[in-house]
Amino acid sequence: MRIAVFASGGGSNFQSIVNATALKTLSAEVVLCVASRPEAGVIARSKRAGIPVYILNGTIEDNISELVNVLGNHKVTMIALAGFMRKIPRDLILLYPDRILNIHPALLPEFGGPGMYGSRVHQAVVASGSLVSGATVHLVDEEYDSGPIILQETVPVLPTDTAESLAARVLITEHALYPKALQLFAQNRIKLIDRKVSFIESQKS
Ligand code: GRF
């Protein structure tokens, strides 16, 4: 499996995916980093790892043919959005059917949807009084945060938590969860029935 990671920020999830490929807990290769802005911290990480970077100049819609060419040139078979702050247009979703994943720093379908990103998510969780939050890896469709859920893991919300302290605890869980979800795809263990996921047992050799 040949992964392109799309990111807009610091890229700690990008790094966890790259690390998992190096450790061989993820049987895949990160072949491309797509960054939505030239200052994104993920760019330096990608360069350090020797992974080519494509910087989007504007929206995906504005650059769709160039982006599709770049993805094709790198023979990308899987796209992992990791803190990517641009809408994924229908054309790209149709080109990579059920092959675009996203990670969300809460337990979807709660605390997701338009405007629910970054610290807003954790602020809403803390304000709700919920005792658990977590991370969700899901497939991307045309609505925000609404595609089939692949994996989730819970994280406790402590009485003393702020959005920042909760975000930091959730992020640690994200770093383990995203490579695990990608590995299910790498091993062809995901089956979707009525847009709900089921797991195929791994083959013993
Ligand atoms: C993560 O919390 C992810 O869930 C969210 O954006 C953040 C990205 O962090 N979508 P990083 O850039 O991977 O460190």
Image: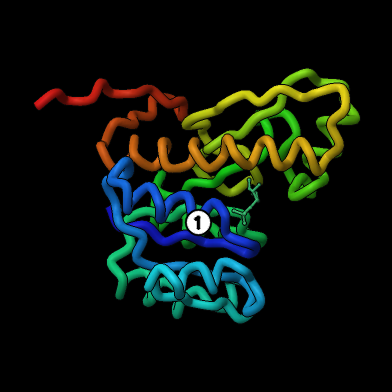
The number of numbered discs placed on residues in the rendered structure image is: 1
**What residue is rendered at 37% in x and 57% in y?**
3
How far from the left and from the top, in percent, is residue 2? 30, 58
Image point (43%, 55%), residue name: 79
Left or right side of 104 for 196? left
Q: Quadrant of residue 26?
A: top left
The foreground one among 197 and 11 is 11
Out of 93 and 171, give the one closest to the viewer: 171
Q: Is residue 196 above or below residue 178?
A: above
Percent of width and height locating residue 51: 39, 71
Residue 100 percent across, percent down from the top left: 45, 50
Q: Residue furthest left?
A: 205
Is the residue at mark 1 in contact range of ligand 1, meaning its CB lies under 8 Å from it? yes
- Which amino acid, mark 1? Phe
**Does residue 87 appear left or right of residue 46 in this picture?**
right
- The quarter of the image holding the C terminus is top left
- Residue 65 appears in which quarter of the rendering? bottom left
Q: Residue at x 72, y 29 (%)?
A: 110
Q: Is residue 147 above or below residue 43?
A: above
Q: Residue at x 63, y 64 (%)?
A: 8
Q: Which residue is mark 1?
A: 14
SS label for mark 1: helix
